[in-house]
Image (cartoon, rainbow, N blue to C red):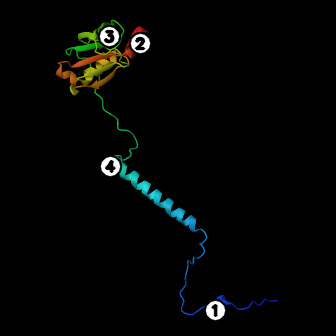
Amino acid sequence: MVQKFPRDRFDSIPHGIERVGAHRAPARRGARWIAFGWAALATVVLAGAGIAAVAVFNDRLNFDDVPAPSASPTPVATVPPTIAPDIPVTVLNGTTTSGLAARASETLTAGGVTVGVASNADASDLQETVVYYASPDLEGAARGVAQLLPGADVRLNEDFAAEGLQIVVVLGADYAEQAAG
């Protein structure tokens, strides 16, 4: 049965009255996830743009000088080792081992190399033995000297040319260990 209520003043609405108050529609399903998705996308785009800008401004990103990949490394041509008795060699001891430069000088002289000076280096904590040559045309002679000193490396260093030295041997701890053994 349907109940009937008596009519009152709220049942009659005057004509011409506009709506008054806030009337909101119900929220759509998933609206919060859509907002979260847009915020996450904006964050990723802004972070990526910031990282790219920093990389470009710090010269970390360079598309111009990218080398083409090669299948195998290009072999480096080396000058064959030669013994040049007319070029005096300076021998420097870069270790704390006493008399190491004199022993290396004897080895070089026995191999046909002329030793000019045998002395101590400025530093006494060098680890590797290096044969320095002052100009590219002396590379073969430097390699010949390095062959007489096991484990010696050969490097171009034009600073010695200013001092009038052509080939300089700097003995390191690796040579001291081999000479002791």
Q: CA distance from mark 1 to mark 2?
A: 113 Å
Q: Earlier in the sequence, mark 2 or mark 4?
A: 4
Asked if labels 3 and 1 touch by Cβ distance under 8 angstroms, the answer is: no
- What kind of element bears circle 4? helix
Please name the residue that numbered disc 1 is placed on: 12
Q: CA distance from mark 1 to mark 3?
A: 121 Å
- Residue 154 occupies quadrant: top left
Q: Earlier in the sequence, mark 3 or mark 2?
A: 3
At x 43%, y 54%, the residue is 48
Query: Is 26 in front, or is 122?
Result: 26
Q: CA distance from mark 2 to mark 4?
A: 49 Å
Q: Position of residue 155 (x, y in %)?
A: 29, 25
Tell me if mark 1 has few (under 14), some (14-19) or many (20+) residues whose alpha carbon lies within 10 angstroms of its own.
few
- Horizontal side, residue 179 vs residue 81: left or right: right
Instruction: Report the amino acid beneath label 2.
Output: Glu
Tell me if mark 4 has few (under 14), some (14-19) or many (20+) residues whose alpha carbon lies within 10 angstroms of its own.
few
Location of the N terminus by quadrant is: bottom right
Instruction: Report the amino acid beneath label 4.
Output: Phe
Badge number at residue 104: 3
